[in-house]
Amino acid sequence: MLGVISNIQRFTVHDGPGIRLTVFMQGCPLSCWWCHNPECIKHHNADDNSEHLRYNVKELMKEIRKELIFMDESGGGVTFSGGEPMMQPIFLSEILDACKKEDIHTAVDTSGLVSTDTFDSLVDKADLFLYDLKVIDNALHQKYTGASNTLILKNLKTLNDQQKKVIIRMPLIPGMTDSKQNIDDVIKLLSQLSNIKNINLLPYHSIAEGKYTKFNIPYKMKDVKVLSEDKITEIKNLFTNAGLNASIGG
C-alpha cells in the first residue's frame, strides 16, 4: 500500500505536543474558502503521474525515525495532516499501527468528514485527534466548505463518547466563522461534550494566497482582512468564560 503525500514538514511545533514531523497527505473532501493547503485538496491515487510523493509504510517510517531524538526529548511525535488523511484510510491505518509498535506518539489532524465505518476503524489507532470545527450552521457550512457537517458532528460525538484525546481547532475567519452566533453555537456544542474541553483558535492570515496563484486556483479571500488582536482576545475570552481551555494558535 502506497500513501500519496504532498509534503513532509520537520520540526513543527503547532501540530500537537512537542517537536513533531507533520505528514501532509493528499486529498480532501472539503473546499474551504480559506484553505491554507489548496494543493492538497485534489485527490490523487498512488498510480497516477502527478508530482506528489509516494511512500510505502517502511519508507515513511524511515523518515519518521530520523526525527526520533527530537521527538523523544520534547515529548513530540508525528502528525498526519492534509488535506484529509482519512481519505487514505488503509495507508493511514497501517502507518499508525507501525508508529504504535515503536511507541511513537501519533496525532491525526482531521476534518471528520469521512464515513462512519472509516472513522470508527481509525478511532483507536491515534493517540490524539486535532479536530477541525468550522461552522455549526449546516447551510453556512455547505456555503463556505462545499459540504454538510452532519458526519463531522457525528464523528466528533464518537470521539467524545469513547473518551479519546481531542483538541478542537477552530479557524477564525472574519465574516464567516467569527460571528457571535457561530461562537455561541460552538460553545453550546462543546458544553454538551463532557470529554472535549480544549480548543485552539486559529486566526486567519493570507499567507497561502501565493499558492492559489501558483496552482491557478480561484482565491475567494482577496478582500478579507485579518482580525485585530483585541478581537481575537475577545473571542478567546468567550470560550474561557464558558469553562473551556482555549488558546490562540496551536
Image (cartoon, grey):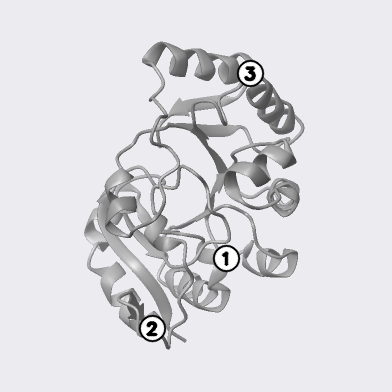
Determine whether, in the image, residue 101 is placed left or right of residue 199: left
Task: Say above or below: 220 vs 103.
Answer: above
Q: Is residue 103 above or below residue 54?
A: above
Residue 186 showing in the rendered view: yes
Residue 104 visible somewhere in the drawing? no
Please, what secondary structure does the residue beneath circle 3 have?
helix
Residue picked out by circle 3: 180
Q: Secondary structure at mark 2?
A: loop
Q: Mark 1 or mark 3: which is in front?
A: 3
Q: Is residue 14 above or below residue 40?
A: above
Q: Position of residue 167 (x, y in %)?
A: 54, 41
Amino acid type of disc 3?
A: Lys
Which label number is shown at residue 125? Answer: 1
Residue at 34%, 67% (x, y): give it.
6
Q: Which mark is residue 56?
A: 2
Q: Earlier in the sequence, mark 3 or mark 2?
A: 2
